[in-house]
Image: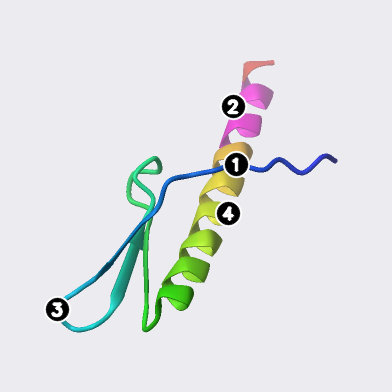
Amino acid sequence: MKKLNYKYRILIEKDENGIYIASCPALKGCYSQGDTVEEALQSLKDAIQLILKLAKYLVNSLRLKDL
């Protein structure tokens, strides 16, 4: 199966406690955090992958029900 590559804009901010908060505005509710920018970014990438896998599963489930 062909792997698709998507590009999403991400935001990373440092909060008042020194924790980095990463978000993906295109995916509502997709947030992550880390002690470093790299940790927050990797965690956000993992979250995005999970959201996209879930979305694909849900779309495929709906298609089966429509038959």
Q: Nearer the viewer, mark 4 or mark 1?
A: 1
Q: Nearer the viewer, residue 57 or 22?
A: 22
Q: Is residue 3 above or below residue 36?
A: above
Give the quarter of the image for residue 50: bottom right
Whether residue 17 sits left or right of residue 24 in the image: it is left
Q: Farthest left residue?
A: 16
Mark 3 lies on residue: 16
Element on which disc 2 rests: helix
Q: Amino acid at mark 2?
A: Leu
Q: Amino acid at mark 4?
A: Gln
Mark 4 lies on residue: 49
State how far apart marks 4 and 1 are (Cα): 10 Å
Element on which disc 4 rests: helix
The earlier-in-sequence mark between 3 and 4 is 3
Q: Amino acid at mark 1?
A: Tyr
State how far apart marks 3 and 2 are (Cα): 43 Å
- The C terminus, quarter of image: top right
State how far apart marks 1 and 3 are (Cα): 31 Å
State how far apart marks 1 and 2 are (Cα): 23 Å
CB-based contact (under 8 Å), mark 4 and mark 1: no
